[in-house]
Amino acid sequence: MIKKLSLTTASAIWKIDDVKVSLWHKREISDDHMKSKILEYKQILKIKSYRLDNTPLCRMFDYFGGMSFVEIGFNAFRDDFVEMFRYFSIRYTEHWFYLDEKILSKEVGIAHVFETMLENDEIEITYNFMHILSDLKERRLLNDVLEDEFSSFWIAKISEKINVSEGLGEIASRIGFVRTTKYATKVGLEALNIYLRIFAEGFTKRRERISQRQMWNLIFDPTTDLYRSGTADMIFTKLLKDAVSEEFAFQYDKFPAENHKELNINKDIWIIYAKHGPSLYFNKVDFSVIESPSLRLEVKWYLKHRLSFKKNIKDRFITEIAPALNMLTKDNPRIKFMADLDEIDVKKLHNNLEKMMYEDNGIKVGTTRVMNTFSRLKVFNEYLMSEHRDENIKSPRPHINHFKSYVFVNPKKYTQNTLIVPNEIIVKLEPHVKELNPSYKLIYKIFSETGLRTKEVLFLEENCIESSRYEGLKQLKYLPHKILSAKKRKGVPSYHKIMITETLADEIVAFAKETEKLRRACALPYIFLVKRQGYKPNMINMNYYISMINKLIEMYDIRSSEGELWNFTNRQYRKTLAVTLIENGATIEELAYWLGHLNRNTAATYYAEVRAKKLEEMNTEFFKKQFDLLIDHEQLEEFTEEERRLLYMDFRLEQRRVEFGYCMKKLADGGCNNRSSLYNCINCKMLCTGKRYLPYWKEFLKEQQTIVDTLIHIYNENQITNYENFKEYQKEMNLLAGYKNIVNKIEESEVK
């Protein structure tokens, strides 16, 4: 039943099938005509004629207008209207898919459905569909209809991808990352779980370390930057994390155990793994950097032998010898195997390497690299000559190892020594250490108090603190990883213990309690574990710790006494602590025990450095400042630290004074062989003088020049021409040269 109930100036209330609807009212349009149009609209929806031709539907929209069209259809004929809206939602979704469109908003637009619904060649409808449902109650129903049809369509597309284990990046770029992950769960959790497991297992088959980030990037297109932490569907995210965690747990044991399978002579890339706390470290060995295929094959055989016995996967053998091997084959194309090398080839390689390193990096760094390269090549060549070479190697056996003839003397002089942290740096830095996060603050304190190596601190275990019999002190127990294998060979206990303050011990225990849950989750004993949002647990990054310390140094402009910005490294505190111990009377044996050295020789090098450091403190500049004397470096070279201290005391007590200076002759060498007079000191290398004596030396020089000039005048008057060989002339000239030398040295020091 359709009946008009009431009338106002511009609108009328109609009752349509027991539903009250407010419609527009025009005086020239009769109620019967309006009623017939409503019935016609109802008939269109009922018989679904719009599926064949939407022209009648468009005429209804044109007649009633947008608001009344929706008001009548949605409120009076809701079921039929919703069914009609669903039909055009499907049409819109399919049409939108083939247009290769992309969704830019959170919701699919209802306005686009109405555009599809009223698109007609005969009737052109211009209307702002964005606001067509603004006054409609329960309009969410239409949103749900559109979302239902849109999601059903794309769930089917996603299901096709999942069934054939293809990535979802193309779909995600069309409908968005959030929708894709949400729709994927609608395919079925069991199917989705299998799909994710297949992708996860693919990492293991490729011997590639899995991670959540790489898993997201594999399933979705990493170039579009679709993935952002926390934006994916929660169920999808959980299933993906579970798949990654289980697969990584499998890889954690499988990859290191199967390193030997990776040592395949037929492959140019080997990927070697090792456990590092809860994570896996890997080394990608790329043999393709060696240009000669035959040399490359020989290197593979050697490295297979090398890695079969070496647990350290961070082997730089390839990167160190590849440039050298390429140089050899470039300079001499006839070289196919190491057996083809002769003395000239190796000599030329040595010259080329030194030239290249000098030009690129400077002589000290370059010399170290040349030494390392030749050392590697010597060992490599030795393997090819030895009985240990694999019987499957078909290349000729070298008979001479030409690299053995190159011996590099004092190689330690070419390496950069670790600096001691000066007191002024420590004083400036320590007030700002509190700005670091708690874990880094604790690491800083451990480094500064114990002098442990980086790995020893990083792998401290939950039970690392033990009591001691001394008040205010406790014991820190750790594994000295650098010498662990050597300790085992000698039958020495693996763990090493040192004393630390009770305050530091309490801080370590407190921190260990904070990371207890993480240790239990990882089933590992290490206290320095960290877990970031979206990442699996890992060890604290020591490189980042060093960068944070240097960032503080840069931020607060902490400079050395020379005015240079200090560069902090993790070994500096170990060296600083060693020097402090020596300066406070520690013996070599005590130092070796504290620093965890297996023998006293390593600790002895620290003693040698400290002695050299103390010796340098009493250098020529020291004596110049103390006594205003000119002392050459060569004069002090033969004096030990103790002898320099005695020399300083003799100078202070005036026991070495001669006229216009001091004598540096060692007492152990006996007294002066010449008579003690100014004349005999002038050309003596043991004489030390200074600027306060300069006026006297100038006067002596002037007088001596007069004597020489007078002597020459007398020779000339007596027509004597060969006087250069006369002893009296030579004696006076030597004295003149001595005066000139002293005056020049003093004047030059004044300029400096």
Image (cartoon, rainbow, N blue to C red):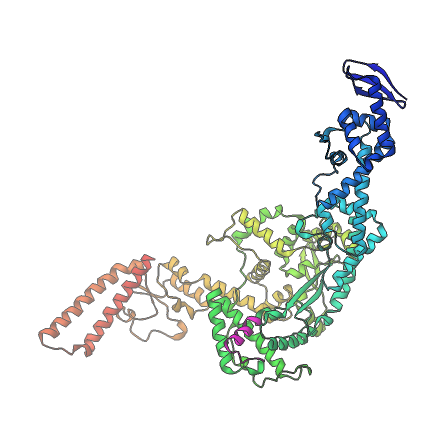
Looking at the image, which is closer to me, 554 or 536?
Answer: 536
* Looking at the image, residue 91 lies above or below residue 461: above
Q: Which picture quadrant has residue 568?
A: bottom right
Q: Quick check: 711 left or right of 231?
A: left
Q: Quadrant of the C terminus?
A: bottom left
Q: Quadrant of the N terminus?
A: top right
Residue closest to the far bottom: 399
Q: Quick check: 694 left or right of 584?
A: left
Residue 65 screen position, x and y as percent? 76, 25
The dominant secondary structure in magenta is helix
Looking at the image, which is closer to me, 702 or 25?
Answer: 25
Q: Residue at x 65, y 83 (%)?
A: 394
Q: Quick check: 464 left or right of 293?
A: right
Q: Is residue 614 magenta?
A: no
* Looking at the image, residue 303 lies above or below residue 569: below
Looking at the image, which is closer to me, 464 or 370?
Answer: 370
* Looking at the image, residue 541 lies above or below residue 258: above
Looking at the image, which is closer to me, 21 or 436?
Answer: 21
Residue 623 screen position, x and y as percent? 39, 61
Residue 115 screen position, x and y as percent? 73, 34
Q: Which picture quadrant has residue 283?
A: bottom right
Residue 423 screen position, x and y as percent? 53, 53
Residue 405 visible within the image: yes
* Looking at the image, residue 64 lies above or below residue 329: above
Tally of numbered discs: 0
Residue 520 visible within the image: no
Residue closest to the far front: 122
Magenta range is: 321-336
Q: Which picture quadrant has residue 31?
A: top right
